[in-house]
Amino acid sequence: MDDTQFNAEYADTHRVFNQPPALSGHNLYAGDTALGEAIAHNGGHWGEAELQRYGEICGRPEMIERGFLANEHKPQFDSHDRVGHRIDQVNYHPAYHQLMQLAFGEGLHSTPWSHPKPGAHVVRAAKYYLHSQLEAGHGCPVTMTFASVPSIQQNPLLATTWLPKITTRSYDPSNRPYNEKSALTIGMGMTEKQGGSDVRANTTKATLQRDGSYLLNGHKWFLSAPMCDAFLMLAQVETATGGLSCFLVPRWQPQGVKNPLQIQRLKNKAGNVSNASCEVELRGAMGWLIGKEGRGINSIIEMVTTTRFDCMIGSSAGQRQATLQAIYHGNHRSAFDRLLIQQPLMQNVLTDLQLETEGSVAMTIRMARAMDQTDDQQQKLLLRLGTAVGKYWICKRTPHHAYEAMECLGGNGIIENFITARLYRDAPINAIWEGSGNIQALDVLRAINKIPAALSAWYAELALSKGADKRYDQAVLQLKNALSNSDQLEYRARAIVDQLALTMQAHLLIQGNNTAVAEGFIAARLDTQGTKNTGSLPTGIDVAAIIERGNPN
């Protein structure tokens, strides 16, 4: 036997079969029944064509590849240039900038502010949900830029100069003074090492100058997206009427001198790795007051609400992409002589994953509608609780959801060139940032105590589905009983927020008029005893109909 014959005989030992092709070239919006129904139900029907267009863009192979490249090549930090000038330059892979350009070109950072209209927040949330499935990390500066607008509006002089450049649909990543640029991005630097979420413990000091600006001295333990053009920061004003106050701190001073906002190091994070986070020292950094001295928390409260809402969008998007990958894999992978998607136990798991996504999408888009209607006091009150409850529940459910979807792919699921591995790494970020689970739960109790009408608005919303299902009615009654019992309320805060979230999601799915989904969710989430693992659904659920709603084919 010669070498040619030998090689031919053994060449098929590495035949590739029963391996699903990569999911790409699909329309992320067209294949997402839950999202489409939520948009129509909440006043975003006018954006249908726009969402179809953008869903196709976000499914393109080259867009998906950018998400992988931005994560494979982490940001790199240069403190000084080659001859010793301090530059504090963070360098990103071109794919990161391409994703940022796409997001800003689509107005994901600005459209409800620059083009307000009924349903503007709903359609923007849907587009951002599609976009976030490409890659999560670069969404951080998109969100912060978007959320900064209400805070900056509190300083009319700054707003006149900055807001047109913040809301424009373009992106300029260059490291140069803000007054030389036509497009600006905004970051945040609230957290200090000794305080964490307790920002009132911040020690950074701000000293008033003759020209009305302030000089900030201190240290920030987390500053996200350090190449933004300015950052909203909290610092203690050293005056008789001062206290914790909010400032806009630019990376460059107006006269073109670099502001002494000096990066110490980049954080080596488990997830969100395409986006840079850093520790920074402020050594007499110039800043402008936002709002009033001593009212820093009030000045950023609407920004916090908006960033929490975007955490809901991002985590819902992560759930959708994870479920999509699991269902797609089940459609193309065989085991024991049947496709995975035909096997009852896998159907149980996939249905459970889809039900989680259904509830998350319904709640997120409903809160977007409330954002569109804040001139209505009931909607404003609903939003006050809704962003804290939604941020807590959706973001906290996402890590385990990501793991379960990853397991559906078996060993492939944990390999870094499969998107499920990245989804798993990124999943905890939103649950921790912008206030972790305990902070959200305590904030819910604080809001209920300070603004009892907020809870009344929540109950009024839930009452719209009264009588639709006895199990739902019983769950609402249990929620009211839990809140009327003041014993160890803080200790029970998480359990109460769980009930607030589940009853709201069940209500919204009932209102969505899909019997299979509403029945499945109530049976799986309300009509059960104790915590169960994913894929422990009771019998009688229409698994085929629910899975099909998440099928990208």
Image (cartoon, helix red, strand yellow):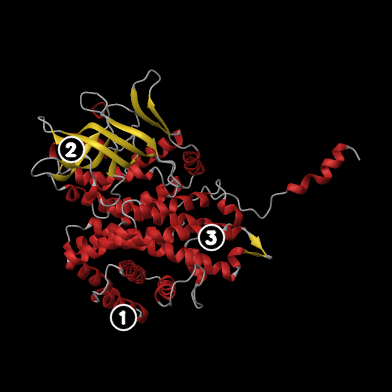
Judge the density around disc 3: few (<14), some (14-19), many (≥20) Cα neighbours within 10 Å. Answer: many
Q: Quadrant of residue 387?
A: bottom left
**Which label sits on residue 327?**
3
In front: 384, or 210? Answer: 210
x and y percent of residue 310 in the render?
33, 52
In space, the residues marked 2 and 1 are separated at their CA atoms by 56 Å
Judge the density around disc 1: few (<14), some (14-19), many (≥20) Cα neighbours within 10 Å. Answer: few
User: What residue appears at the point 25 percent right and 76 percent down from the top-left corner?
Assistant: 485
Q: Who comes first in sequence, dot 3 or dot 2?
A: 2
In front: 49, or 12? Answer: 12
**Which label sits on residue 206?**
2
User: What residue appears at the point 23 percent right and 40 percent down from the top-left corner?
Assistant: 204
x and y percent of residue 141 in the render?
33, 42
Q: Is residue 20 above or below residue 60?
A: below
Q: Is residue 227 above or below residue 420?
A: above
At label 3, which amino acid type do we have? Answer: Ile
User: What residue appears at the point 55 percent right and 59 percent down from the top-left corner?
Assistant: 407
In space, the residues marked 3 and 2 are separated at their CA atoms by 53 Å
Instruction: Name the mark nearer the viewer: 2 or 1.
Output: 2
Q: Is residue 466 left or right of residue 355?
A: left
In front: 278, or 238? Answer: 238
